[in-house]
Image (cartoon, helix red, strand yellow):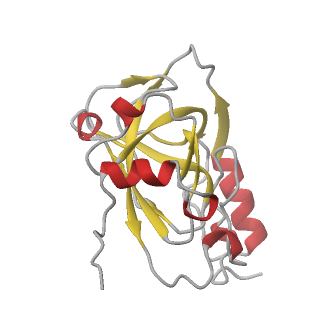
Amino acid sequence: MSVRSAILSDLKILERLVAEDDKCIFVSPLIDPSTEIGPSSLDVRLGTELVITRTTSSTHIDLTVSKGEVERQVKEYSAHWRVRPEDTFVLHPGEFALAETLEFIRLPRDIAARLEGRSSVGRLGLQVHATAGFVDPGFEGVLTFELINSGRLPVRLRPGIRLGQLCFFHVDDVQVPYGDRPSNKYGGRLGVELTKIYEDPEIPE
């Protein structure tokens, strides 16, 4: 029995990028493979759509109320904002924003991925995901950056900057890939999606 590496190397990533449909890791656009593919990862870039948090009179988001009320609170707290490719935006210290990857990703059913921040970005105090960095087999869509500026200075960003990197893992015997699951809440999207925690069964009707 052959032993396979848990994390795909650069060569294996390249092989999967050009593989047949049921084995292909689809990434588009792939602008410059020579700079985007590292020894065991693939860089991803900042897209053009953001969701920023509004200042409101609310003291908290209440996850103990009904689904409809949680959804209303989430939408009241958030504002969509689109940045033109040639424009910039500033993330101030302590601010939080959701953003999309420029790349559309589709994973086969035997590959999972994890989104990590690039070291060069992290050393500026910029976190690219708070908790939700795992990408299930069978996922397709753009990925979401959870941007937090943990530094002391504002950071100016523009679409196209490489903020994160994807590591890929072999997964065997997946019965129901992400795209086929009834609980699939975020797959197939082409922009930033607000939290859909109100669809969780723990939230009352």
Image height of 31 relative to 41, above or below: above
Q: Which residue is most to the left?
A: 123
Image height of 79 relative to 105, above or below: above
Please count the marks in the image: 0
In this picture, residue 134 sits left or right of residue 194: left
Residue 138 position in % (x across, y down): 60, 67
**Does the rendering let one see residue 14?**
yes
Residue 201 position in % (x across, y down): 67, 83
Q: Work out whether residue 84 or residue 69 is closer to the camera in this orientation and state it.
A: 84
Image height of 18 relative to 20, above or below: above
Q: Work out whether residue 183 or residue 22 is closer to the camera in this orientation and state it.
A: 22
Quarter the C terminus occupies: bottom right
Q: Work out whether residue 125 or residue 113 is closer to the camera in this orientation and state it.
A: 113
Q: Which residue is most to the front?
A: 1
**Does the rendering let one see residue 129?**
no
Residue 94 position in % (x across, y down): 37, 40
Residue 114 position in % (x across, y down): 40, 59
In this picture, residue 146 sits left or right of residue 69: left
Quarter the N terminus occupies: bottom left
Q: Residue at x 24, y 34 (%)?
A: 120
- Quadrant in the picture for residue 67: bottom right
Q: Residue at x 39, y 45 (%)?
A: 42
Q: Work out whether residue 106 or residue 123 is closer to the camera in this orientation and state it.
A: 106
Q: Residue at x 69, y 45 (%)?
A: 190
Q: Residue at x 52, y 25 (%)?
A: 159
Q: Which residue is most to the top?
A: 86
